[in-house]
Amino acid sequence: MKEKQKYHALKVDTEKCFGCTHCMKSCPTEAIRIVNGIAVIDPGRCVDCGNCLRACPADAIYVVHDNISQIENYKYRVVLFPSVFVGQFSEIYSEGQIYEALLKLGFTHIFEVEQPVEWLMESVKESRKEVAEGPLISSFCPAVVRLIQCKYPSLVNNISRRKAPHDLAAHFAIQQLKKKGATENEIGIFYVSPCSAKMAAVNQPVAEKESIVTGIINMKDLYNRLMKLIPVKEQINTSEYRKYLSKEGILWSLPRGETSWYKKKSMAIDGIHNVVKFLERLENDEVPEFDFLELKSCNLGCAGGILLTGNRFLTVERLQKRAAQYPKASQILTHEWDKESTKAKLVSEKIEPKPVFVLDENRTRALEKMQRINNILCQLPGIDCGGCGAPNCHALAEDIVQGKARMTDCVFLQNKYVKEQKIKPEKAYKNLEKKWGEKRFEADCNKKGRRNEGF
């Protein structure tokens, strides 16, 4: 049976893209190449971390999300959002004002996904016994899960088989609404995503057939909508919606939000490039033994998500102040709800490895290709300029061995070949135009992609 195509929330607008290489240089998995002057994303290598979107100076990379109008198809319209969403708003707005704006927009029920988060942490701790050797790795960040699947498949069995907080909140919300007489067909669950990775995870879950979530909403889009609806002052009491929210829940998506629960030897790492470096060492047994690893793709965790509007440092500061006003998770009473039933639904299916960083499935041919790569690297300049349309010389050598590129794609080697009269100047120029597009090298003072533009 043909394997289902990998879903990605990140797309390239070919009308806006002009091949500036910012995205290619920022990609932690070397998933981007420049072809005919346009960025092309390899769907196998992409983990939806969103670094390319953040780096693009032309807004040529965007995320696909659902239209918020679809909430009208349901009687019970539930919005789920992580606490970092509240952290986007200035201190002049209270939680109540934000919640009221959501109700004005058309939602009937509101849940911050980190409540009751202690149920999830209990389940995560219980999953430790499922790992035979090495540390238990949090499954919180879908970009990290996809990264391990495709680049570090030997570590897949260390990933906790527990779903994300939005699944916890979704099941908890459905349990509450059913108790009030609602049927599942009447309930629409809409998750407000802080990043492209979580959007991809909802559309195509890693370890379940389909997500319990009905639709996904772009957090940046929702923020802009609410700013037009937010009341001058609180008019109704919305505290009931935050009844099961705790100090730990509010800080859950920030660095050490998970490890603070895990009292044994643990480590928290944020930033996808930092995560990649650590996983390289972990796979090679070059790090001390750990019981638990919290790995988050974005710097400062979800506070640094690509779909957030505010400064990530201010967001962290606001969340810490907000958390100080809430009780500890151990003080939250949830005895009236069926905890064990919900916890059982948080256990995911087995996560399968999906390696793509392999030269050949045949070991002998793979070793031969590796030798060819080393031979090619001896001829390449090692400048890693990106002028070939690949992020670095090693990536170009891999592409050449795999039949996706040629030696003449290297602009330095091409100049050398022209000097040695192995290739005509006209041919060399056509090669450059084929890679970077026609008229790319004509003077244009309005050209984007200059230093720091778009950051």
Image (cartoon, grey):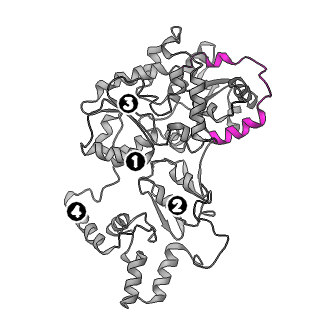
Q: Where 195 falls versus 24 (above or below)?
A: above
First in sequence: mark 4 or mark 2?
Answer: 2
Give the residue furthest to the left: 364
Instruction: Confirm whether the magenta stretch covers residue 223.
Output: yes
> Which-is-in-front pick, marks 4 and 2?
2
Give the amino acid at mark 4: Arg
Q: Residues within 10 Å of mark 3 (few under 14, many from 20)?
A: many
The stretch of residues the image draws in magenta is 218-246
Give the amino acid at mark 2: His
Q: Quadrant of residue 422?
A: bottom left
Q: Residue at x 46, y 42 (%)?
A: 297
Q: Residues within 10 Å of mark 1 (few under 14, many from 20)?
A: few
Q: Are marks 4 and 1 in contact (CB under 8 Å)?
A: no
Q: Nearer the viewer, residue 429 or 255?
A: 255
First in sequence: mark 1 or mark 3?
Answer: 1
Residue 46 in percent (x, y) is at 45, 52
Q: What is the distance, in whole Å, between disc 2 and disc 1 at their CAs?
A: 32 Å
Disc 3 element: loop
Q: Where 58 falls versus 334 (above or below)?
A: below
Marking on residue 161: 3
Q: Residue at x 32, y 39 (%)?
A: 156
> Which-is-in-front pick, marks 3 and 2?
2
